[in-house]
Amino acid sequence: MRSIIMGPPGAGKGTQARFVSERFGIPAISTGDIFRANVSQGTPLGVEAKRYMDAGDYVPDSITNDMVRHRLAEPDCASGFLLDGYPRTLAQVEVLDDILAESSTALDAVLSLVVDRDEVVTRLLQRARTEGRSDDTEEVIRHRQELYAEQTAPLIDAYKQRGLVVEVDGLGEVGEVAERIAAALSDL
Ligand code: ADP
């Protein structure tokens, strides 16, 4: 299964991606996690990415696309993957199409986690208190939500036109949401 999980910042993509990864035996690839790992290791990629991430801006497509291209070429992605946090722009959608076409593969599903805007802001502010992510301040959170609405939400419509989108209600207990997702993916 080659798939993407989409939803606004705070929708619970990372948490749910880990469940899907375990249940379906495919790697969950989070571009945010890869960037954060590079930031904490102080790699050149991390130094570059941090400037954008701390402001809540998107890391430039050229950097992000290369990183994803390399990750998807790893052997563990051969039989499937779940992308979390990528693609986020229409240009990234096109690059992902190219990457998949090069290996004569295609996407099977785009999982859209549907959540209420106020609820996600509350969750992010909560996470700011417990995890201390440098991009979880109120101002940066608001900026990330705006960028998402402007640049990333339209991708869901683009994938809807391809008939790939599976919508799942993201409100409720983590375990309940995980069951909804598993049921939706098993029905494919
Ligand atoms: P969230 O979904 O809560 O915004 P992520 O961990 O997915 O958190 O992403 C954190 C940050 O990493 C983003 O705000 C952005 O700066 C950067 N990032 C992650 N994925 C991408 C991407 N596909 N394109 C550009 N920037 C990205």
Image: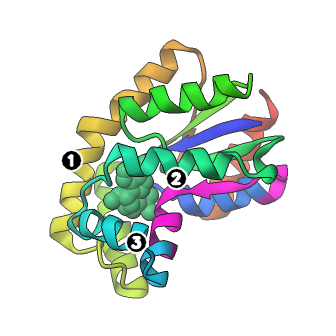
Q: Is label 2 or label 3 in front?
A: 3
Give how far across and how far down residue 12 sits, in percent: 51, 59
Q: Determine if residue 9 is in view.
A: no
- Label 2 and label 1: CA atoms lie apart by 25 Å
Query: Label 1 crowding class (10 Å Cα cut-off): few <14, some 14-19, many 20+?
Result: some
Identity, as a three-letter code, of the amino acid under mark 2: Met
> Above or below — where is 129 with respect to 17?
below
Rate crowding at label 3 as few (under 14), some (14 to 19) or many (20 or more) other CA atoms within 10 Å: few
Query: Extreme left residue here?
Result: 139
Between marks 3 and 1, how big is the CA–CA gap?
28 Å
Ligand 1 shows up in the quarter that is bottom left
Mark 2 vs 3, N-terminal side = 3
Q: Which residue does the numbered mark 1 point to in the structure image? A: 146
> On the picture, is 78 further left or further right than 176?
right
Circle 3 or circle 1, nearest the eye: 3
Q: Which residue is mark 3?
A: 44
Horizontal and vertical percent for residue 118? 28, 56
Residue 108 appears at what percent x and percent y?
70, 27
Q: Residue at x 75, y 56 (%)?
A: 21
Which contiguous range is marked in magenta? 22-37
Q: In front: mark 2 or mark 1?
A: 2
Residue 69 lies in the magenta stretch: no
Q: Residue at x 59, y 15 (%)?
A: 163
User: Can you identify the residue that label 2 sits on?
Assistant: 67
Find residue 46 and report its horizontal and vertical position in percent.
40, 71
Instruction: Tell whether position 23 is magenta.
Output: yes
Kind of residue sitting beneath label 1:
Glu
Q: Residue at x 71, y 36 (%)?
A: 2
Q: What is the secondary structure assignment of the residue under circle 3?
A: helix
Determine the image quadrant of residue 125. bottom left
| Residue 104 in which image quadrant | top right
